Amino acid sequence: MNETRKIDRLDAAPRFTEHDAVRLNRMFRGASTREMLAGVIEGDLAGDLAVVSSFGAESAVLLHLVADVDPPVPVLFLDTGKHFAETLAYRDALVERLGLNLVVLKPDEAELAAKDESGLRWSYDPDGCCEIRKVKPLAQALARYDASLTGRKAFQSSTRANLPRFEIDTSDTQGRLKINPLIDWSADDIDAYFEANDLPRHPLVARGFPSIGCEPCTHKVAPGEDPRSGRWKGWDKTECGIHRPGEEPFL
């Protein structure tokens, strides 16, 4: 397990600005994903960074790329207490296979007891459940980093169609950089990478789950449907909250 940074920032200046995001997008225009990751990580262009991963359907691709460039990069995983058993087993298998530096984040026990004692908040207030189990623990952890890497891809949903590679995390007042290395990858690109690198698939993919989150809020998707249409089915909700609506939504 990774030890988080021991020294908190003493200055209040933004880590990055919109100008920095534009500059980085221009700098790596035309570069392959691996070239971009190597340039950012080895060139220390993003400061202290971490990967945020759900260990979901397509997570192995970004994790493999990052491990190939710099295995010690922390991989943050939100253990909500509601994951499929298959997801936890898949996580452990990938950590061992790729030599990942896993950091497990958990919700605050006192807040869970006060606001979700029954464990059923997902059934009547999914936003509130995500806030307690995902948004708050991740925000607390990311405060120690200057940048985060996500697994978002444009083809996953209409809300992710126009995202750039580099953007400023609008949920963070300190100007943290959010990097989307796979944003321009297609579903075929993802499949080809799995095959070329002999990466194991999440076992639920073959059972009709192209996008995998917490077990109570994840349903099967019919062929041809939006890959994320099985998430929070029946609710007007497409994101858990770690990617704010203002960003046109992590992971």
Image: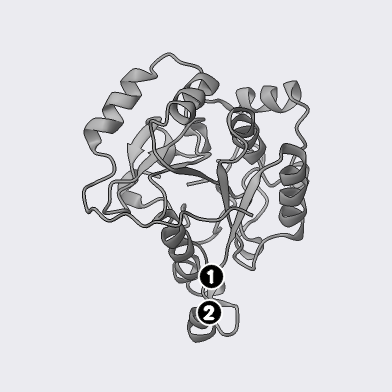
**Residue 38 vs residue 60, the one in the foreground:** 38
Look at 72% across and 37% down and name the residue there: 98
**Mark on residue 66?**
none
Res. 88 image quadrant: bottom right
Image location (x, y in percent) of residue 110:
51, 82
**Residue 118 vs residue 142, the one in the foreground:** 142
Q: Categorize mark 2 by other alpha carbons within 10 Å: few (<14), some (14-19), many (20+).
A: some
Image location (x, y in percent) of residue 181:
49, 30
Q: Is residue 181 left or right of residue 246?
A: right
View extreme (top): residue: 30
Per the image, label 2 sits on a secondary structure element best described as helix
The quadrant in which the N terminus is found is: bottom right
Image location (x, y in percent) of residue 193:
67, 24
Residue 209 showing in the rendered view: yes
Q: Categorize mark 1 by other alpha carbons within 10 Å: few (<14), some (14-19), many (20+).
A: many
Look at 41% across and 59% down and name the residue there: 139
To which residue does mark 2 refer?
A: 112
Kind of residue at badge 2: Leu
Cβ–Cβ under 8 Å for marks 1 and 2: yes
Residue 56 showing in the rendered view: no
To which residue does mark 1 refer?
A: 107
